[in-house]
Structures are given as structure tokens and as C-alpha cells.
Image (cartoon, coloured by chain):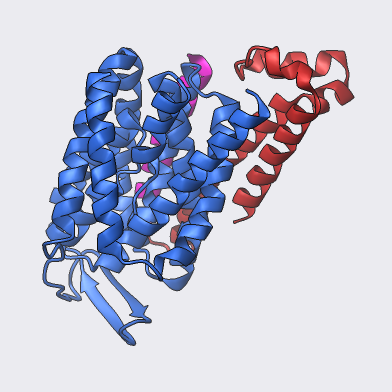
Chain colours: A red, B blue
Amino acid sequence: MAGIVTSGTLMLIGFVLYAAQPAWYDVPVPAATFAWFGSLFEESGVAALLNPYLSLYSGIFALMLTPILRLVITGWTFLVERDWRYVIITTVVLAVIGVSIVFAVVH
Amino acid sequence: MSPLVFLLVVLAGSVTGVLGALLGIGGGIFLIPVLVMGFGLPMHQAVAASVVTIIATSSATASVYVDKGISNIRLGMSLEVMTTIGAVLGGVTANYLPGDVLQKIFGVFLLFMAALMWNKTRTRTTAEIAFDPAAAITGEYYDEAERRTVRYSVRRLRASMLASIVAGNLSGLLGIGGGLIKVPVMTMVSGVPMKAATATSNFMIGVTAVASAFIYFSYGHLDPLYTAAAVLGVLGGSQLGTRLGARLRNRTIVAVFVALILVVAVRMLFS
């Protein structure tokens, strides 16, 4: 639930910032690349924090991290129980998700 | 996106959340056609938004079922190996398909789902529940409605794993949760009680969805405005749907929903 609350709050902040600054309505939606994130903080920290897309993307990524964290906790629980079979299975699932993350970064 | 469009997308997300909670399905079946036909969003972006809303639905509900011990984590993880592989492959495949082709595949899938849902209200979908302590995976939970502890063992795991790769593939390809496939497979093939199967599916769909979400993101299909608005709506709607669920007759809801998705399927196929 902490992940849901965090991501929901960030998304709400993003929409409040978006609605409060109508100039953003006509700006094309930026793609969340590493270059874009880096460029945000080139001007000033305040300008970056007022950028609604930073909050919106952060909220979405926080949400996407939630199931991954759930998997990590599940794997840890199996590790504590010394259930090696399921430690391996959970690691394989995490590895598949890792492949998709690497694909996203490289693509 | 104007504030009005934002509110309308939140509303669409809310209806998705309500239907998802009432019918025990992921929201993609409703959300994707609304985003495509109602808001003119390209098919791939609608699928990407749907995939993220599935993560929200799963995260909001899974913890409750896990805490109550109804979700079978070992079964879920065993099946998840196949569903995540299927989801990644489905996500990559979808991004190579033109939007109109993906839309038609979605239309055909809606017709299939309508038939499956209608059939579900008329036939018994749970295999006989048996408990073999020597089985590779067993489970037990306390059924509050029946006021007893239900014990079961999982049968034919390999067959369920094979079906899970199809569920994962469809999830990645079409942005649906896949619960409509996973739950019947777990109950009918592996003899898992319906409550445990639904709870385990809820745990799984978020993990499956995140595997393909990164693929859609990498192709630039993740629109933060539509996605976040839909997520906020789904989170609110699923809470409302859970409360409404106890008051409405499930069969009536299913009949209305089946009629609705038949109309949507025809429009998706021929638009």
C-alpha cells in the first residue's frame, strides 16, 4: 500500500502542477529518457520540481517498482525459510523483469 | 490535455475500477476501447496505459489477500516464471504490429471473453478440491464465509504453467490482466479453490504487467497524462466497486457487461 500511496500522491501533485500552469497544455509530452531527466536539472532545481512531467513520471515509475519490491520481499522470505527451490524461481522471475528493464534502457 | 479531458479519463478509469472489482477482471477490456474510441489515443498507448492500471489494481488488492493467507505465493511464483516470459514476448510482438492489426486482435479477444464470461455464469468452473500432503504445492486458508479452513493441493502444475505462458502473452500483447484465463486454469486444471485462485491471480497480474510495461515504455508508448489519470480513476473506482459488489447481483452485471463488450468488439473489429 505504501507504493500505491506514494505513486498516487506523486501523480496528483503532477496534475495539480499541470493544471496550475496552462502553458503546459500546448507542450508536447516529453519522452522519459535519461537525457530528458538530466536536462531537467540543468536550468534550476525549482524549475525541475515545478515540471509536472517529473512528478507524473515519478509516480508511474514508483507504481512500476511496487510489484518488483513485492518480488524482492517474497524472495527474501523464501531465503529466510531456506526454501532454495523458490529462491531460484523468484530469482528467475526477477531476472525476466530485469531483461525487460535492460531492454527499456538500451532501446 | 485539458482539465476536462483529464476528468473524463479519471471517470473512465473509475468505471474500469468499479467493473474490475465487481467482475473480478482487469480493467483493460473496458479501458482500452474507451481510450481508443472515446479519446482517440493510438492503440499502443492505450495498451500501455492499461498495463500500468493493472499494476495499480494488483498492488491495491494483492496485499490484502496475501495478509489473509489466501494467495498461494508458491503457486503464483511457479506460474509467474512462464507468465513474465509470455508478457515480455507479447509486449515486444505488440510493438512490431501496426495499431489497426492490434485493434482487430483485441476485438477478436473481446468476443472470446464475452463467450467465456457468459459461460462462467452458467457452468461450474471449479474442479473437485482434494488435499494430498505429499503434493509439490499445497495450500490452506480460512474461509470466512464458510467458517472453516480449506486445504488443497495443486495438481497438474506443468499444464497450468503452459497455459500461463498464453495468459502472460495475451497480457503483454493486449494490455489485459489475464485473470480471466489464469483463474479458470488454476481452478479447472489444478484444482485450486476459486478464492485462492482469484487471490493468487491478483498477486500475479501486477508482476506480469510490469514485465511488459517496461517494453511499452521503451517504445515511447507510455503517455504520462493519460496513464496517470487512468490510474487515479482505477484506484478510486476499485474501492467503490468493492463496496458495491455486495449489493448488486453478479449475474445481472455480467449480462450487461457481456452485451457491452459485444458492441465494443464489433466496433473495434470494423472501425
Indicate the quadrant containing the N terminus of chain B: top left, top right, bottom left or bottom right.
Answer: top right
Nearer the observer, B192 or A92 = B192
B236 vs A21: above or below: below
Does the segment drawn in magenta span residue A91?
Answer: yes
Q: Quadrant of residue B227?
A: top right
Q: How many numbered marks have been drawn onto this rendered protein structure?
A: 0
When the figure is inspected, residue B30 is found, relative to residue B134, above or below; the finding is above
**Quadrant of res B99:** top left
Q: Residue B217 in the image: state x and y as whole percent.
A: 50, 23
Seen at 51% across and 47% down, the residue is B14
Q: Residue at x 32, y 21 (%)?
A: B94
Q: Is residue A81 magenta?
A: no
Q: Residue at x 70, y 40 (%)?
A: A12
Q: Is residue B110 above or below residue B180?
A: above
* Residue at figure coordinates x 80%, y 29% from the top left: A20
* Residue A80 placement (x, y as % from top left): 49, 63
Q: Whole-percent x and y of residue B116?
A: 16, 48
Residues in magenta?
Answer: A88-107
